[in-house]
Image (tube, rainbow, N blue to C red):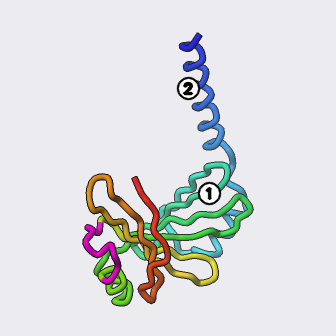
Amino acid sequence: MKKISLVFLIVMTGVVSSFAQLREIPKEVREQFSRQYPMATDVDFNDNLLNVNIEFTLDNEKWTAEYNNKGVWKHSEKKWTFEQLPDAVKDGFKKSKYADREVKAVIIIYLPGDITQYRIKTEKSAVEKKYLYFNPQGRLLRETITI
């Protein structure tokens, strides 16, 4: 009986995943994305039923944007380097209690309301990994644990 339940669960997971990929991307999302990023190329829409994540290229850089199903933009982000960070953000990191951690990745995040944040992925050991979020003035806004 456990074997049958496991097989059923696996099949149903595949059916739900397939449905998410078969659904038409909402028109509102496509329209809003086109207005916001008219010069985007290599556009790939990924629908997860609750949100639509869009990977694209803009000015030879890889970006990701997220919209809800009604076409409301939630955020966009692109890879960044520590060297590209504003001096205030680098200084804020160096003065933080996390300055001894290794920087593994940096992402610049654009949010509604013309808000910019910088996410720095840090690692102290294999189990001590955190995302640190800074504003452009170098103030640490929050931290989250990452896997």
Q: Tell me: 126 left or right of 39.
A: left
| Distance (Cα) linking label 1 and label 2 | 24 Å
Identified by mark 2, the residue type is: Ile
Q: Quadrant of the N terminus?
A: top right
Q: Residues within 10 Å of mark 2 (few under 14, many from 20)?
A: few
Is 76 magenta? The answer is: no
Residue beneath the point at 45% across and 73% down: 133
**Total numbered labels placed on residues in the image:** 2
Secondary structure of the residue carrying tag 2 is helix
Give the residue at mark 1.
52
Secondary structure of the residue carrying tag 1 is strand
Residue beneath the point at 62% across and 28% down: 12
Identified by mark 1, the residue type is: Val
Give the residue at mark 2.
10
Q: Main secondary structure of the magenta part?
A: loop
Q: Residues within 10 Å of mark 1 (few under 14, many from 20)?
A: many
User: Which is nearer the N-term, disc 1 or disc 2?
Assistant: 2
Magenta stretch, residue numbers = 95-103
Residue beneath the point at 25% across and 72% down: 100
Q: Tell me: 36 left or right of 78.
A: right
Q: Tell me: 89 left or right of 73.
A: left
> Residue 2: x and y, percent?
56, 14
Residue beneath the point at 50% across and 61% down: 55
> Residue 72: x and y, percent?
70, 68
